[in-house]
Amino acid sequence: MAQTCTPNPLYADSTFGIWPDTIVNLPCVKPGDPYSTDLQFKMPTEAAQVDSAAYPPGVPINWIRLENVTGLPSGISYLTDAASSNPPDQWDGGTQGCAALFGTAPATEGISDVTIDVTG
């Protein structure tokens, strides 16, 4: 069953980021158990916030689109709050968003390297 999420106002004043992250507070998936957690994020407004070596201050980010997520354990899916936007999974620079992670992980243990590909 698909899950939904709502952007948390706690992060409205943040510059940009993802909460929780893989180092701080992202709940582990227990093999064979149902899993559900929300990722909260705030989009950057300028390219220099992401890569100050490549972009000078003042280059705006108009939008960011989620292109692909790889490496999630089998049985774990995601659904964003912008899944039904046009185009799907796209947010304006500086806005908040979220993704619900849900499902049941396989009954084996291991570490998953998750990669999130975006275009801005």
Image (cartoon, rainbow, N blue to C red):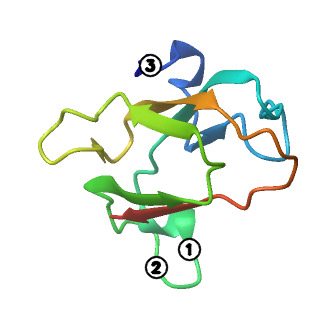
Q: CA distance from mark 2 to mark 1?
A: 6 Å
Sort mark 2 into few (<14), some (14-19) or many (20+) by Cα contacts within 10 Å: some
Q: Which residue is mark 3?
A: 3
27 vs 1: above or below: below
Query: The N terminus lies in which quarter of the figure?
Result: top left
Q: CA distance from mark 2 to mark 3?
A: 37 Å
| Residue 27 quadrant | top right
Residue 68: where, in percent of width, then height?
41, 60
| Quadrant of the rendered image containing residue 103 | top right
Residue ID for mark 2: 55
Q: Secondary structure at mark 1?
A: loop
Position in image of residue 120 (x %, y %): 33, 64
* Label whose residue precedes the other's in the sequence (2 or 3): 3
Judging depth in this view, the residue of 7 and 30 nearest the camera is: 30
Instruction: Estimate how packed mark 3 is, as few (under 14), some (14 to 19) or many (20 or more) residues with alpha carbons within 10 Å.
Output: some
Q: Amino acid at mark 3?
A: Gln
Horizontal side of 51 relative to 22 (left or right) equals left
Whether residues under marks 2 and 1 lie with C-beta atoms below 8 angstroms apart, the answer is yes
Per the rendering, the mark at residue 51 is 1
Q: Nearer the viewer, residue 99 or 73?
A: 73
Q: Are marks 2 and 3 in contact (CB under 8 Å)?
A: no
Q: Amino acid at mark 1?
A: Asp
Of residues 22 and 103, the one drawn nearer to the viewer in this rendering: 103
Residue at the extreme front: 107
Q: Residue at 86% of width from left, 53% of height from top?
A: 110
Residue 75, by quadrant, is top right
Query: In the displayed structure, would residue 22 be above or below residue 4?
Result: below
The disc placed on residue 41 is: none
Residue under the point 46% across and 21% down:
7
- The kind of secondary structure element at disc 3 is loop
Closer to the camera: disc 3 or disc 1? 3
Determine the residue positioned at 40% across, 22% down. 2
